[in-house]
Image (tube, grey):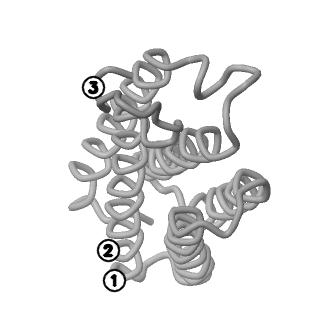
Amino acid sequence: MVPDSFTGYFAGATGAAGALIGLLFVAVSLRPESVLGAGASAKAQAVAGSAFTALINSFFVSLIALIPGTNLGYTAAVMALVSLFSTFRLHRGLGKGELAVRQLTLALAAYLSQFVVGALLAASPGHKSLVYIIAYVLVASFAAALGRAWSLLQGRHTPQVPGTRLQDT
């Protein structure tokens, strides 16, 4: 059970996640050939996919939390497993570059934490402190997704042609 005091937070998080998913689509549409095209790099696809995964995770956990009487633990655990699977699939094709390792480590930490806390919350639905932890994990997911979306917008995932500025790409 999600305490009533969290209704505003989860309503805001649902709206924010929905809006950010839309903005991610805009960012991808600015460089569709470099993110989704046949010649798109694995790094670009992983950055876009991991941002999308984090936002979808946050959206569904927050949305389900708004349903009265729902045990948020089950949703948090299931979404963590889905997100872990997606993260492994997205990062499988990347090398051992610093960005890939950092993104993978942060994503694994967030989703593993969410899974453990979700499982604990499923077993003890009245444990308010576990709902706080889920809420903070969602904040971390938003931060990670925004960072990835910003790097997409800047074109950091694409190789730079000598003599061009980032704004020109």
- Percent x, y for residue 156? 43, 42
Label placed on residue 132: 2
The residue wearing badge 1 is 129
Which quadrant is home to the C terminus? top left
The residue wearing badge 3 is 167
- Closer to the chain start, of discs 1 and 3, is 1
The amino acid sitting under disc 1 is Ser
Vertical position of residue 133 compared to residue 35: above or below: below
Q: Residue at x 39, y 60 (%)?
A: 138
The amino acid sitting under disc 2 is Tyr
Residue 71 or residue 118, whichever sits in front: 118
Please report contact status of discs 1 and 2: CB closer than 8 Å, yes or no: yes
Q: Does residue 17 appear in this view?
A: yes
Crowding near the residue tagged with mark 3, few <14, some 14–19, many ≥20 C-alpha atoms within 10 Å:
few
Q: Residue at x 45, y 50 (%)?
A: 58
Direction from residue 41 to residue 145 in the image, left or right: left
- Percent x, y for residue 71? 54, 63
Which quadrant is home to the N terminus? bottom left
Element at label 1: helix
Q: Give how far apart the Cα atoms at labels 2 and 3 are.
A: 40 Å
Crowding near the residue tagged with mark 1, few <14, some 14–19, many ≥20 C-alpha atoms within 10 Å:
few
Quarter location, residue 75: bottom right
The amino acid sitting under disc 3 is Gln
Quarter location, residue 6: bottom left
- Percent x, y for residue 84? 69, 63
